[in-house]
Amino acid sequence: MIFPDQAVRIVIATKPVDFRKGHDGLAAMAHSELGFAPKAGVMVVFRSKRGDRVKVLFWDGSGIVMIYKRLEQGGFAWPKVSDGVMRLSRVQFEALFAGLDWRRIHAPRPTHPPATE
């Protein structure tokens, strides 16, 4: 999958959207309802009402890119439906996009080596 730079923030619009919207409609929604300007370096993930489709919107430096995916069987694992957004790590997003349960992926807690004398 085409993916922007490592430092991009990834957010899920937790409320389902009308999937008839295209680039401009989703960019306008991201700006007006979620507070993210299309060129702000944020990847916004939108979900369908049925939960089996996803649209991803981001700015690649020269234009708005929209990625659409529909699962053939089952559905994506989504957070609880509410207004607003939720942030994901890149690994969580990749799991979500692959159709896996991203909620089971957690960053390992750093451990400090024991002090040596």
Image (cartoon, rainbow, N blue to C red):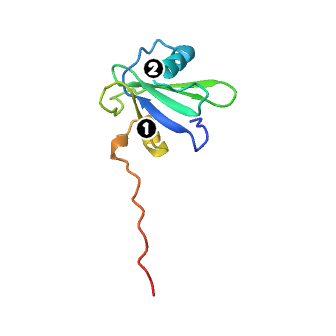
Residue at the extreme left of the image, as rendered: 80
Using the image as rendered, state which of residue 114 and residue 1 is in the foreground: 114
Crowd band around label 2 with a 10 angstrom C-alpha radius: few (<14), some (14–19), many (20+): few
- Tell me where residue 18 appears, x and y as whole percent: 42, 14
Secondary structure beneath dot 1 equals strand
At 62% across and 24% down in the image, what residue appears?
64
Residue 87 disc label:
1
Give the number of the disc on residue 45. none
Q: Name the kind of residue labelled 2 in the image.
A: Glu
Instruction: Say whether disc 2 or disc 1 marks the residue closer to the N-terminus.
Output: 2
Structural crowding at the residue carrying mark 1, measured as other residues with C-alpha within 10 Å and reported as few (<14), some (14–19) or many (≥20): some
Residue 4 in the image: state x and y as whole percent.
Answer: 60, 37
**Figure check: 41 above or below 32:** below
Q: Which residue is mark 2?
A: 33
Please tell me which residue lies in front, 48 or 79: 79
Percent position of residue 53, x then y: 41, 24
Q: Residue at x 56, y 25 (%)?
A: 37
Residue beneath the point at 53% across and 16% down:
28
Above or below, 78 against 29 in this view is: below
Determine the CA span between mark 2 and mark 1.
16 Å
Point 59% across, 31% down: residue? 40
Q: Kindly identify the amino acid type of the residue bearing the numbered disc 1.
A: Arg
Q: Which quarter of the image is occupied by the N terminus?
A: top right
- Outermost residue to the right: 62
